[in-house]
Image (tube, helix red, strand yellow):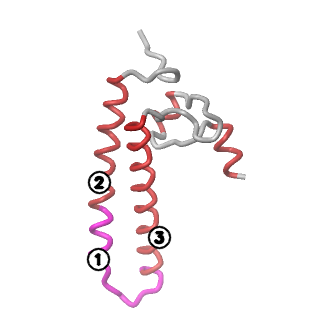
Amino acid sequence: MSVDHRRTPDQSWLADVRASLADDFATQTARLRELTELNADTGDPGEAHNQAALLVATRQNIEQITGALSRISDGTYGACQKCGQSIPAERLDILPHARFCVPCQEKQNR
């Protein structure tokens, strides 16, 4: 029997999401540490640009994960931050740090 996570996520599902996000956080934090330690200037502008882009992307991932963990803690996880409607469980399964439902995300992207 399937549980509908769109209305009231059960504690087991939230615990699984929290654990997965915590693992992702640890991975991204280790990646950030490696990237900042590799701060050696090779003299190659392309390499410097790639490293800068990786740093920005990694920091953004950490910010998104931290936000999702905060929403789990404060009980707002799974609710769209724009319209307040439930974000479908299928979307959260694919993008666990999603802040918006699909229609609001599409408006945000415009």
> Which mark is first along the chain, 1 or 3?
1
> How far, Cα to Cα, is label 3 from label 2?
17 Å
Rendered location of residue 22, percent (x, y): 30, 45
Does the magenta segment cover residue 39? yes
10 Å neighbourhood of mark 2: few (<14), some, or many (≥20)? some
Rendered location of residue 57, percent (x, y): 45, 62
Relative side of 98 to 18, left or right: right
**Placement of 14 over or under 21, stated as above or below:** above
Residue under the point 45% across and 51% down? 64
10 Å neighbourhood of mark 3: few (<14), some, or many (≥20)? few
* Mark 1: secondary structure: loop
> How far, Cα to Cα, is label 3 from label 1?
14 Å
Residue under the point 32% across and 70% down? 35
Instruction: Check disc 1 and report the residue beneath it.
Output: 38
The stretch in magenta equals 31-47
Residue 53's tag is: 3
Does the magenta segment cover residue 24? no
> Which mark is first along the chain, 1 or 2?
2
Instruction: Check disc 2 and report the residue beneath it.
Output: 27
